[in-house]
Image (cartoon, rainbow, N blue to C red):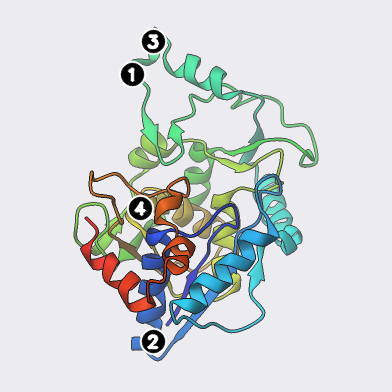
Amino acid sequence: MITRFAPSPTGPLHLGHGFSALTAWRMAQAAGGTFLLRIEDIDPSRARPEWEALIYADLRWLGLDWPEPVMRQSERAEAYAAALDALWDCGLLYPCSCSRRDIQEAARAPQEGAPLLGPDGVVYPGTCRGRDRGGARPEGAVLRLDMAAALAALGARELGFSETGEGLGGHGGYVGLTPETLLTHVGDVVLCRRDMATSYHLSVVVDDAAQGITHVVRGRDLFEATAIHVVLQALLELPVPDYHHHRLIRDATGKRLAKRDDARALSAYRAEGLSPQQVIALFESSV
């Protein structure tokens, strides 16, 4: 078993991050496997070296260890470009010039009905789909996956994944993906952003395969995004790992923790003198 924890160095780790990392580490330890740390620093406008250093300090303080050196996404541009080129050459990507406002307004048009929400927010209404793609993959452009073309390319291939955690409905098992779900509730997601020459969805799939990840351990909030990842794995002929989506750590009001919740930062608890065992106990007491 090979698990991983892949934080972004854009702020301090909070209790939810600690719980996720510890869950992945314990799973690997119990199976005699390997726990890997990966730094997802593909957003140069937000990633900071001081936050990356704090990630290492917090995780080591919790008692976690991992092989060195760690994979850093900022060093993997060639791998992401190769994946994008493969999808482009198969006619599965198209440039998109829509702003968020454009998408919101198109999705709210009377003929469209209420906007559908997918893993990335409002499902893209397809405004730019079908436009002339030109020749080679354009540099510095936003690129979307043509989901209908992708499903046509995959033909009758079965799409799905094994869920060993709580999933979305509180239980595990095999999760099958239907074309209707992918077209209606996922749609044409962005695989290349203008400011980072890739996207979370593309980079995480390419990196999980490169590291031989067998079990992806992450929060239940990313359960719906797994559909995107399974489609990309099929298109790029990459293995599909098992997925383990765990419960989310919430505050007393039931709100999911985020990086803006600095009061719940692991470093803050550490500075206050709490022991790692006391912080780990908070994982179990959090709603």
Please give the label number shown on residue 223: 4
Residue type at mark 3 is Gln
Using the rendered view, name the quadrant where residue 211 is placed. bottom right
Please give the label number shown on residue 114: 1
Q: What kind of element bears circle 3? A: helix
Residue receiving disc 2: 29
Q: Earlier in the sequence, mark 4 or mark 3?
A: 3
Q: What kind of element bears circle 2? A: helix
Residue at the image position 65 percent from the left and 47 percent from the top = 46
Pointer 2 and pointer 4: residues touching (CB < 8 Å)?
no
Disc 1: CA contacts within 10 A as few (<14), some (14-19) or many (>=20)? few
Q: Earlier in the sequence, mark 2 or mark 3?
A: 2
Disc 3: CA contacts within 10 A as few (<14), some (14-19) or many (>=20)? few
Q: Who is closer to the viewer here, 207 or 24? A: 24
Residue receiving disc 3: 111
The residue most toward the left is 170
Q: Is residue 263 left or right of residue 90?
A: left
Pointer 2 and pointer 1: residues touching (CB < 8 Å)?
no
- How many discs mark residues in the rendered view? 4
- Please determine whether, in this image, residue 131 is positioned above or below residue 258: above
Q: Nearer the viewer, mark 1 or mark 3?
A: 1
Q: Nearer the viewer, mark 2 or mark 1?
A: 2
Residue type at mark 1 is Ala
Mark 1 → mark 3, Cα distance in angstroms: 9 Å
Q: Earlier in the sequence, mark 2 or mark 1?
A: 2
Picture coordinates of residue 264 (x, y %)? 39, 55
Mark 2 → mark 1, Cα distance in angstroms: 46 Å
